[in-house]
Each structure stands twice: as C-alpha cells, then as structure tokens.
Image (tube, rainbow, N blue to C red):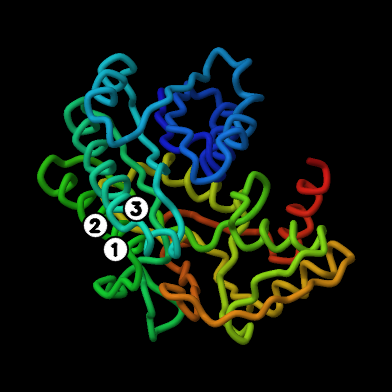
C-alpha cells in the first residue's frame, strides 16, 4: 500500500515508518523540518530509512496547499496517516495563531486533498489534551470535549471536527486516535521524560511543577504504533479511539523511577503549576481493546528502562 505519513520524521512518525517499511509498504514521509526543536534530530530519525527504495521524503509545510496538491497528484496515496502538528501546551499559549494555522488549517488541507484524490483511509493523530480538565476519570471517547484549556487542545479539537465534516459530507473513511503522553526512543528533547533524564544525567536542575501529584497516562511508543497499525488494518468508516496505557503515574513517581533507572539523584527546581496543564490524563481503553484490538503491553518501569538504554547509547 502507498502511504503518506505527515510528520514522518518526528518522534511517533519515524517509529511508525520503521514498522511500515518492515511490512513492505511504500512510504512517503512528509515533514517541514521546522525549528521547534533541532531539525538535525529529525533528519537523524529517518536517516536509516533512506536506503530503502520503498521510502521517500518530501520536505513541505502542510500549510502550503499548492505544493501539497502537487504531491498528492503525483503519488496517488491509498492511505494518509496525519501526525504532523505543532505540539505542546505551553508554547501554544505564546503562539496561538501558529497552532491554529498548522493544526486546523493544515489538517483541513490534507482532508480536502484526500477527498479530491479518493484516498481510501485517513488516520488522524489527536491527543488526550482534547479532554481538558475532565472531572470524570478515566477519559472515555464519549466524554464531552467542548472545554479546552489551551490553544493546542482547541486546535486539535477543531481538527477532529473537520475530520467528522469530511466523513459526513464526502464519506471519507476517518479514524481519530487520541494519544496519551507518548514516550520512548526518538522522543522529542523538550518532552518531560527526555528532558528530565538529560537534566538528571548532567546534574542540572529539573523543572518540577506543582507538588508532584499531577498524574499522566504514560504510553510507550511501540504500543501507540501497534494501535495505529490496528487502525490501518481495520479501516473504519468513522470512529474515535483512545490510545493510552490506562495506568497513571504521578510526577513525583516518574522522577523517582528515572533516578533509580539512571542511578543518579535529581536536583529539583520547584515551580508553580503552569497555565494549560491538566491535573491528570487517564485513558479508558475499553472500546480500543474490544473494537480496535488495541493491546498495550509496556509497563512504565519497562518503558523507562528501554528509553534509558536508547538514550545512553546515543
């Protein structure tokens, strides 16, 4: 199958592409290699794939409709896995317009081109942030998502709504996958686990927000990739699924686990809770297990050990 993976040089995208190449698919990686973090990291993420005839890279911003149109017309994709986005809650508060343009308008461009080119399936990588401050835990796909607390989460909700519009109007097959705090090899350097690990190793102060009681549903990237592959296999007409581990870990527990794994004590820099942060993310994966066939297997302890092994070999 000929597959477009947007954001393919990023953290989740490059891990997904690795699995898709092994499954003998033809892959087009689309990425703009922007400077949200060092673009050399992204280029290194996909360097090993360049030797495969079944892999190609298109450097393009999803805001550029004209160039995207040319790529779609030339490549004749059967499937789009849309992972490209401006990520991060706190940066979105500083640059809300950029987040709207990339995450909402860029997604609409891709949906429109998928419709025009009769793409058979569109998979959208969404986020647990759409649930906002949800008083009901764990978070279910049926919960309301009308109270976002950051421009990032609002932009992803808007993109989800556009996905439904294109399914409703044009019968485009769409699967929305809401990712819960993904970590593992190739994780972006500013994300908590990677950032904390580096600061512990260097003996630098680690930013510790609040009292350490905030909890996240940390999900290992191989489990996320497994969920995406299941969605590709099933090809739903339209559906929404949580991809999480369905177990939560507090900030304090996470730091302690990193200390034990890395064999070094953290130096904490205590800071107040940040705007846009939620107290908990926690996925109800009942539907994902029964309908999608999703089955996460990696515990936080095992996942941190795997991540640390990758980091120390870099």
Quarter of the figure with the N terminus: top left
| Residue 308 location, quadrant | bottom right
For the residue carrying disc 3, how many other residues have a C-alpha within 10 Å: few (<14), some (14-19), or many (20+)?
A: many
The first of marks 3 and 1 along the sequence is: 1
Quarter of the figure with the C terminus: top right
- Foreground mark, 3 or 1, reads 1
x, y percent for residue 197: 74, 60
Q: How far apart are marks 3 and 2 (CA)?
A: 12 Å
80 and 98: which one is in front? 98
| Residue 275 location, quadrant | bottom left
> In the image, is residue 88 above or below residue 174?
below
- Foreground mark, 3 or 2, reads 2
x, y percent for residue 270: 65, 80
309 and 171: which one is in front? 309
Residue placed under numbered mark 2 in the picture? 158
The first of marks 3 and 2 along the sequence is: 2
Residue placed under numbered mark 1 in the picture? 154
- Report if the CB atoms under discs 3 and 2 are less than 8 Å apart: no
x, y percent for residue 287: 41, 65
288 and 312: which one is in front? 312
> In the image, is residue 240 above or below residue 41?
below
């Amino acid at each position: 199958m000929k597959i477009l993976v947007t954001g393919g040089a990023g953290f989740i995208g490059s891990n997904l592409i690795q699995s898709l190449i092994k499954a003998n698919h033809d892959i087009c990686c689309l990425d703009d290699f922007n400077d949200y973090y060092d673009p050399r990291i992204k280029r290194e993420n996909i360097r090993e794939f360049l030797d495969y005839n079944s892999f190609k890279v298109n450097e393009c911003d999803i805001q550029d409709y004209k160039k995207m149109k040319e790529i779609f017309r030339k490549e004749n994709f059967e499937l789009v896995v849309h992972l490209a986005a401006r990520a991060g809650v706190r940066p979105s508060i500083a640059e809300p317009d950029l987040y709207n343009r990339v995450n909402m308008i860029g997604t609409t461009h891709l949906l429109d081109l998928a419709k025009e080119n009769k793409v058979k399936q569109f998979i959208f990588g969404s986020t647990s942030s759409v649930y906002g401050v949800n008083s009901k835990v764990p978070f279910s796909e049926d919960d309301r998502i009308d109270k976002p607390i950051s421009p990032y989460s609002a932009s992803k909700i808007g993109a989800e709504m556009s996905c439904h519009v294109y399914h409703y109007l044009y019968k485009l097959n769409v699967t929305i996958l809401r990712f819960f705090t993904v970590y593992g090899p190739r994780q972006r350097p500013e994300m908590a686990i990677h950032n904390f690990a580096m600061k512990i190793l260097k003996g630098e102060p680690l930013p510790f927000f609040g009292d350490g009681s905030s909890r996240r549903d940390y999900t290992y990237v191989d489990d996320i990739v497994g969920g995406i592959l299941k969605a590709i296999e099933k090809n739903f007409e339209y559906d929404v699924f949580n991809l999480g581990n369905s177990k939560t870990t507090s900030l304090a527990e996470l730091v302690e686990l990193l200390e034990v794994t890395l064999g070094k004590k953290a130096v904490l820099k205590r800071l107040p809770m940040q705007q846009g942060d939620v107290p908990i993310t926690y996925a109800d994966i009942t539907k994902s297990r029964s309908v999608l066939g999703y089955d996460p297997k990696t515990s936080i302890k095992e996942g941190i050990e795997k991540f640390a092994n990758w980091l120390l070999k870099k």
